Image (cartoon, rainbow, N blue to C red):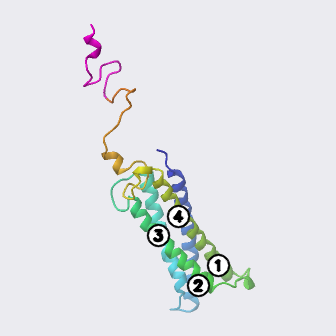
């Protein structure tokens, strides 16, 4: 069973990089506003700063889980991944949408550092939202590739399923059973070939 582990790791790396950039941009904006007016800050900027920080931690952890094929510990199943991505997706959507509404007319001050900073925050906020959306679809695709074995409780790395690990193995009659010596009579086989002697 092939999986899209490589594509999912690449998307998580992209989310990690974009979140780091968004964190630095929002931190810069927060520093400037607090410096200009002590005690004043923009809640939208703080919200995007928080979700960027969460996305950094989340991406680094899930990359480790997928790459190391972890099957135990916190958030190692598709259920946990879907919950975490849904939270990040909602926070990125709300933060980016509110910021876009508040800073809709930035074209008049293009070239000014403050306006360029806000434009960059909007851009990377929406980029993180898009990457999170793609990650949700990638996880759904990875899960769907298991067909009848699909189960959100299985490990999110997508290499095997919990149902498959508990079912009885089925062997092809044309192939020797595991552990048998090639050319030997399989265990339990009738002595039909020797009775003719």
Asked whether the beta carbons under mark 1 and mark 3 sit within 8 Å of each other, the answer is: no
**Residue labelled with disc 2:** 32
Give the residue drawn at x 58%, y 84%: 32
Which segment is the magenta one?
179-197
Position in image of residue 182 (x %, y %): 35, 21
Query: Disc 2 vs disc 1: which is toward the camera?
Result: 1
Residue 179 sits above or below residue 60 on the image: above
Q: Which mark is residue 86?
A: 3
**Residue labelled with disc 4:** 16
Residue 27 sits above or below residue 85 on the image: below
Callout 1 secondary element? helix
Give the residue drawn at x 50%, y 63%: 136
Query: Disc 4 vs disc 2: which is toward the camera?
Result: 4
Whether residue 8 can be seen here: yes
Callout 4 secondary element? helix
Q: Which mark is residue 117?
A: 1
- In space, the residues marked 4 and 2 are separated at their CA atoms by 24 Å
């Amino acid at each position: 069973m092939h999986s899209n582990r490589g594509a999912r790791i690449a998307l998580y790396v992209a989310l990690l990089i974009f979140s780091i950039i968004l964190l630095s941009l929002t931190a810069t904006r927060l520093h400037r506003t607090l410096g200009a007016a002590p005690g004043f800050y923009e809640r939208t900027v703080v919200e995007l700063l928080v979700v960027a920080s969460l996305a950094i931690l989340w991406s680094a952890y899930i990359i480790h889980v997928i790459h190391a094929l972890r099957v135990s510990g916190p958030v190692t199943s598709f259920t946990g991944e879907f919950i975490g991505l849904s939270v990040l997706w909602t926070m990125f959507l709300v933060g980016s949408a509110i910021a876009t509404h508040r800073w809709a007319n930035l074209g008049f001050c293009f070239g000014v550092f403050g306006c360029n900073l806000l434009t960059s925050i909007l851009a990377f906020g929406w980029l993180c939202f898009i990457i999170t959306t793609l990650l949700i679809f990638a996880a759904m695709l990875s899960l769907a590739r298991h067909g009848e074995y699909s189960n959100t409780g299985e490990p999110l790395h997508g290499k095997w399923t919990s149902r498959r690990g508990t079912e009885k193995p089925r062997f092809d009659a044309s192939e020797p059973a595991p552990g048998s010596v090639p050319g030997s009579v399989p265990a339990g086989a009738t002595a039909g070939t020797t009775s003719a002697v």
